[in-house]
Image (cartoon, rainbow, N blue to C red):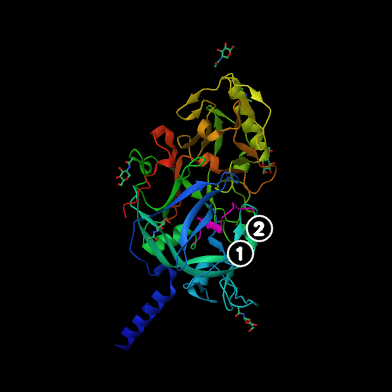
Amino acid sequence: MAYCNFQHLLLLLFFISSPSFAQTSFRPKALLVSVTKDASTLQYLTQINQRTPLVPLNLVLDLGGQFLWVDCDQNYVSSTYRPARCRSAQCSLAGASGCGECYSPPRPGCNNNTCGLLPDNTVTHTATSGELAEDVVSVQSTNGFNPGRNATVSRFLFNCAPTFLLQGLASGVSGMAGLGRTKIALPSQFASAFSFHRKFAICLASSTSKGVVIFGDGPYVFLPNVDASQLLTFTPLIKNPVSTASAYSQGDPSSEYFIGVKSIRIDENLVPINTTLLSINKEGFGGTKISTVDPYTVLEASIFKAVTQAFINASAARNITRVSGVAPFEVCFSRENVFSTRLGWAVPTIELVLQNQNVIWRIFGANSIVDVSEDVLCLGIVNGGENPRTSIVIGGYQLENNLVQFDLATSRLGFSSLLFGSQTTCANFNFTSTA
Ligand SMILES: *[C@@H]1O[C@H](CO)[C@@H](O)[C@H](O)[C@H]1NC(C)=O
Ligand SMILES: *[C@@H]1O[C@H](CO)[C@@H](O)[C@H](O)[C@H]1NC(C)=O
Ligand SMILES: *[C@@H]1O[C@H](CO)[C@@H](O)[C@H](O)[C@H]1NC(C)=O
Ligand SMILES: *[C@@H]1O[C@H](CO)[C@@H](O)[C@H](O)[C@H]1NC(C)=O
Ligand SMILES: *[C@@H]1O[C@H](CO)[C@@H](O)[C@H](O)[C@H]1NC(C)=O
Ligand SMILES: *[C@@H]1O[C@H](CO)[C@@H](O)[C@H](O)[C@H]1NC(C)=O
């Protein structure tokens, strides 16, 4: 009997201390947050509710980000804030080993005997230290068609950052929502809180429209009744063994999502590039990642040169004339002779060839061309210079109106290709609540 009681006690302790077993309101199969684009910074913003009483927070969506971090210095009022005590299960889940002290009056973000992490502003590449803590987080559930009831995680782990870390972020924002490959990023915490699949999908809308991030498995349905989870082509997600965060502990893998681009073609012609740059080396340099904090795709200098030359050449073959660049773009064209199609401007198609010749991420005019004025169209790709950390960064503009799913359990990425081809867009989620 004593043995039995001891087991119960252990089990009880486990339930109290493990954030994976945090008390939750009900068990949705998936969760939903909306995403908009800030016109001045081109950052993608999302909203979640946090604290007691609940406060809606605007956050910059950071696909590769390590965790949720918020400014705790300004207006953090909550009756359910709990700092993570040193050597607790929370600290070990977060990989936070230190033990911190704070020499001002206690408040959220400043407590003794707590472990800390290094929150990272991935827009400005600034990192600092911040207290690990838990508080209530609430977001809408979804059945994949509409939003439903709000679902609450009572002890959601996040990091408390000082106000200065917000510099460079869109106005009205109070932190960053990291969706990266860690145990405490939003996808993993939501999946473990509600026991759903460790999968999520992003569908960024263009300009002022509202896109979505859905945590959990499909269906992911867009009006008029297009289930984008049925349109996916899959490629393996690749681990970068070296952290790409601004400040990091040696030996930590990157929390960002990399895929294996093997070659690039333009209008089906192979672009001559140095393929060494396409793989990730021992120091973590090279490869291709997907980012929501880079507004446009960034290519290493030699890849940029080869790709833009081939694009200009293939455009010339379509009688499309090059004109002077318009910052930040070097390659621009006259709108004369450029036709409009269902997939955007009729320009050469850029193809990222993945694990084999049949798995291709195609970038059509809607994702490659930015309208900069009445008469000028620019190729929405920027030059990343020599020796950048990552050779190809697929940026926000190239992701818009494509549904991209990340499956953490099987380490695989699914991409829909431009949804215009399936008669829908990322702005077509039906936001009418059925709660
Ligand atoms: C932390 O402990 C130090 C030394 O005991 C004390 O001076 C300080 O006020 C405490 N800080 C907080 C936030 O409790
Ligand atoms: C549910 O969440 C939505 C979106 O975050 C929010 O607008 C709404 O006020 C919440 N409803 C309740 C009852 O908390
Ligand atoms: C290809 O890139 C690698 C990595 O930057 C470099 O070491 C090598 O010299 C390059 N090869 C050529 C032929 O330029
Ligand atoms: C330029 O385009 C022509 C015809 O479209 C093609 O034959 C040639 O290989 C291209 N050259 C480069 C450098 O892309
Ligand atoms: C390009 O322009 C030339 C001369 O005006 C014309 O002969 C040719 O058919 C055009 N090509 C395309 C692809 O429109
Ligand atoms: C959106 O969803 C609501 C609730 O299911 C439904 O009544 C409405 O008809 C849908 N809107 C469209 C345009 O289908």
Q: Does 330 sit left or right of 184 as displayed?
A: right
| 375 is within the stretch colored magenta | no
Q: Residue at x 51, y 25 (%)?
A: 346
Residue 417 % position (x, y):
45, 37
Q: Disc 1 marks which residue? A: 118
Q: Earlier in the sequence, mark 1 or mark 2?
A: 1
Going by the numbered disc 1, the residue's amino acid type is: Leu
Quadrant of the drawing holding the N terminus = bottom left
| 171 is within the stretch colored magenta | yes
Which stretch did the figure color magenta?
A: 168-182
**Residue 8 appears in the picture as rendered:** yes
In the depicted view, which residue is nearer to us: 56 or 160?
56
Q: Disc 2 marks which residue? A: 126
**Residue 405 appears in the picture as rendered:** no
Report the disc number at residue 318: none
Q: From the Cβ of disc 2, is ligand 1 less than 8 Å away?
A: no
Packing grade of label 1 (10 A; few <14, some 14-19, many >=20) is: many
Q: Are marks 1 and 2 in contact (CB under 8 Å)?
A: no
Going by the numbered disc 2, the residue's amino acid type is: Thr
- In this rendering, is residue 186 above or below 372? below
Q: Residue at x 33, y 62 (%)?
A: 27
Residue 135 % position (x, y):
47, 68
Residue 145 % position (x, y):
33, 47
Taking the image in four quarters, ligand 1 sits in the one at bottom right
- In this rendering, is residue 21 above or below 294? below
Packing grade of label 2 (10 A; few <14, some 14-19, many >=20) is: some
